[in-house]
Amino acid sequence: MHIFRDEDANLELVQNKKIGIIGYGNQGRAQALNLRDSGMDVLIGNRSDTYSQKALEDGFFCLSIKEVVKRVHIIMLLIPDEVIPNVFDQIILPGIRDKCTLVFASGYNIAFKQMVLPNNIDVILLAPRMIGVGVRENFLNGRGYPSFIGVEQDVTGNARQIALALAKGIGSTTFGAVEVTFQQEAELDLFTEQCFGPAFGNILTSAVDLLLERGYPPEAVLLELYMSGELAYTFQKIAEMGIVEQSSLHSLTSQYGSLSRGMRFLAPEIRERMLEGLNEICSGEFAREWRAEQDKGASSLTMMKEIARSLPLHKLESELLEATGKPRPSVHDSEKNVQAETISFNRDIDTVDSQKNGKFLAGWSFQGLVKDFLNLHAYRNKGKGLEGKEYQVVLQRFLNKCESDKNLIQFAAETKICIVYQIEHPQLIFFMQFGDRKIKTGFGEPQTEADIRIIMQADLLDSIFTRQTNAMRAAISGKMRFHGDTRLAMRVQKIQEDLCRIYIESRN
Ligand code: NDP
């Protein structure tokens, strides 16, 4: 194991160089303040707005990005990853000085080939494992925080030393810096966001779901599981002491209970899913999909955020926060964030009109989709579910009707897709194949490969097709899982209403 500490870095290497911080947001402000406090000569590059106003208030010189690039030896790119390729090509590249140092705070754009670099400069990585506020706080309190450093291009022969000096300047080597490649940094980062985070989130929401179903008061459930802050505190202790040793901070009952019962949650399936996610990341499949999504204005991201906000759990959280006197920032603020993220992708740097996309969210209304996620359980408890044999009869009738439905035939004229439904309890597989104005259905696996495979319990399928539960929401909550092409899966939403109508007719 190798960790670079303060004694491995020489600040003098960068003290005689001008450093340009591009962007004065989360990381930009924190890193600029830390570097200045470490004795560096720092200039801020930002257009004239509230960010540059903040930089001026903090006592920095702030110029346009173009002007800063002309004046500095080290350029630190601290603007969102989504806008870096355009800003670099249009503003930075034309003015970049020979043998200067370009610093990324994330490996994403290089790892996934979103931009081309000139070969006459040093290119390094300095990626804090800490949010901007923490970068500043942990510098001031002397604790430091970890960073990943890396070297992509080294024309001066000094790139690694410069990366270490900057890591020391922003206060990271007090804790420790670790060397990785741009690729490793980007893949680890995405893995945490796409695999570990959602797996953990789903375990959390499964626990909420189960306890609410068993009738525990919602405020007690949310506080017990995560909203008291105890979980965050435990994670802090895990970071300081390790997983096993932190357990000594809990009661003996807790230690015995978690150690003796923990093994039953070793679910190999979760590891398989994580591997699937990691492969998507490493192959560049995710980066390509995200690029395409940005090119169309990130409408799917907006939609998924909107749906997630419509979940009853979100509402329960708001109620609890209000009851404890700490209301969360208004939905209006959150929506503004979504807009800001979306607008910035394709922004023309010199002619910005941040008002023009003000109605971005107006087209999405999911009032009809918002249903209490307890509905499914209420539905089950009312005993309206189908029995095993009935189920197959209804499905056979449903598939027959689908084949001759004129709306579905129209869909089959526009879309070629093979959907496999894999039902659990009772186990059953059926498929629907659309294309060339025809619909082919049947039980078992189809002859051609499925484009999407939807997996869920029988009673959930019944609940979705009888409009008791929203399909998209079931997918987000993890009750319905799918494999295959996400965009094709979203297209199936178009016929969801027809499928419900036909299913209800068949069921009746
Ligand atoms: P922010 O979202 O906080 O960046 C905001 C800054 O970027 C503002 O100064 C804004 O200025 C500028 N900006 C936004 N869009 C554009 C544009 N189109 N052209 C020029 N400037 C623009 O970014 P972060 O600090 O969150 O992230 C910066 C880098 O740090 C990224 O590479 C990220 O991956 C990395 N990172 C972030 C971490 C975090 O905790 N946030 C942690 C570790 C690494 P204006 O809108 O006025 O132009």
Image (cartoon, helix red, strand yellow):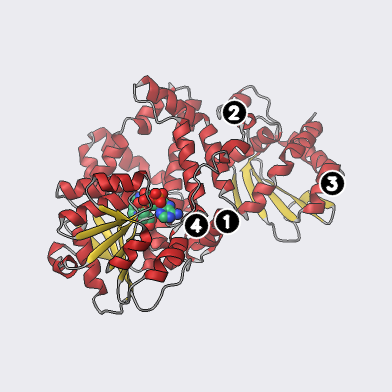
Q: Taking the image as drawn, is residue 357 in sight?
A: yes
In the image, which disc is placed on residue 277? Answer: 4
Q: Quadrant of residue 408?
A: top right
Kindly identify which residue carries mark 2: 371
Disc on the earlier residue, 1 or 2? 1
- Foreground mark, 3 or 2, reads 2
Amino acid type, mark 2: Lys
In the image, which disc is placed on residue 295? Answer: 1
Real-space Cα distance between discs 3 and 1? 36 Å
Q: Are marks 3 and 1 in contact (CB under 8 Å)?
A: no
The residue carrying pointer 3 sits among few (fewer than 14), some (14 to 19) or many (20 or more) residues within 10 Å by Cα, namely: some
In the image, which disc is placed on residue 403? Answer: 3
Q: Nearer the viewer, residue 473 or 359?
A: 359
Disc on the earlier residue, 4 or 3? 4
- The residue sitting at 43% across, 23% down in the picture is 319
- The residue sitting at 57% across, 54% down in the picture is 293
Quarter the N terminus occupies: bottom left
